[in-house]
Amino acid sequence: MNKKFELSEDSLKVLYIDQEMTSGMIAMKIGCSRRTVSRRLKEFDIPMMRKPEVTQDELIELYTHQRLSCKEIAERTGYRSWTIGRRLKKYKIPTRGHSRQPSRFEIPKEFLKDQLKSTYKGKFEIPKYVLDDLYTERKMTIAQIAARFRCDVTTIRQRLKEHRIAIQPQWKRKYLPLPEDEIIDLYVNRKISVASIAKRFGCSRGTVEKRLIKHNILRRNTAGKNNGNYKGVTKEMKRLNVIMSSGIRSSIKRGKGKRRVKWLSLIPYTHKNLIRHLKKTIPPGYSWKDDFINRKNILQIDHIVPVSAFNFSEPEHEDFQKCWALNNLRLLPRIENARKNARLDKPFQPSLLM
């Protein structure tokens, strides 16, 4: 048998009339359905509260003249956005299309001042000096200008032709002024994807790829052995590489690896021998302390024969000793290391994994 909710007339009037709570809010508060609250309102002859209807003139003023969105109108009137959309269809008010507004470009308020007063069914006028500044000087695309003025791309093209502003082909558009060093650092050192970098700078993925190609940086290949989940890369090989790389990094830069003998027990040289060898490989114009110890990622430890060329599963294997041998380690600037990637300078034959 269903439980009957005890709700007195006085408490319902306090919630519904005094506190102006909706039937749904009251239902959530006492733990019943909205239909139950509606029945109680009818039983106690409590008049239903109705929201004031939005008139056609109000919608034309808010939506057409003030160019407010359905969501903004709904917040002002207390309705939902889809209700405002239904009212626009009911009154046959032409709706605007959805437009994605780029966040990287800002138009001065004086440029938009006259456009907020556009008349209903009127021609959308844009001054010539505004289009010339946005399109020619700031190098904004037609789509970006259309999104800012909340109009169609075709409208911007027509205004450019009317003002006799030459429309440049896409291949003649200049590169965006992007910090290329920061892009290389994000992609190579922080391992951030091209899509995430493009989203951060507000450009396309192709633009980021062009910057990487300009500096001879190869795209990361997530197929085959370069993928950590690839079945050919064993867990033992990944574990050994992590032990060695983290141990060397912490011992040199942080001075914490001298007592951790785990990585030192896997190779035939000592901590001092490693530092002495790496100091000999410092490129001209760089210093050990300023560019490697104190400054992050200016110089990096590089494998002359890349790790991906070896095949091992235990520290006693011949390939593991060759991979982490002193004559296979050197210091390189991070950009040169990124350009080198996993390329081999000369042919190399790995040992068979028995």
Image: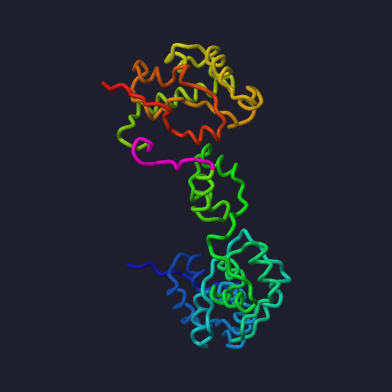
Q: Is residue 218 shown in magenta?
A: yes
Q: Please count the marks in the image.
A: 0
Residue at 58% x, 78% y: name it. Answer: 158
Question: Depth check: 32 or 160 in front?
Answer: 160
Residue at 58% x, 52% y: name it. Answer: 201
Side (left or right) of 58 relative to 82:
right
Q: What stretch is highlighted in magenta?
A: 215-227
- Tell me: residue 219, above or below residue 302: below
Residue 60 locus on image (x, y percent) = 60, 85
Q: Does residue 266 appear in the picture of this structure?
A: yes
Question: Depth check: 349 or 151 in front?
Answer: 349
Residue at 34% x, 17% y: name it. Answer: 317
Q: Does residue 74 appear in the picture of this structure?
A: no
- Tell me: residue 245, above or below residue 83: above
Question: Depth check: 190 or 90 in front?
Answer: 190
Q: Is residue 146 shown in magenta?
A: no
Residue 235 locus on image (x, y percent) = 35, 29
Q: Is the magenta stretch mostly helix, strand or loop?
A: loop
Residue lying farthest to the right in this orientation: 110
Residue 2 locus on image (x, y percent) = 35, 68
Residue 88 locus on image (x, y percent) = 52, 83
Residue at 43% x, 70% y: name it. Answer: 33
Question: Depth check: 347 or 230 in front?
Answer: 347
Side (left or right) of 279 relative to 112:
left
Q: State which quadrant residue 277 falls in.
A: top right
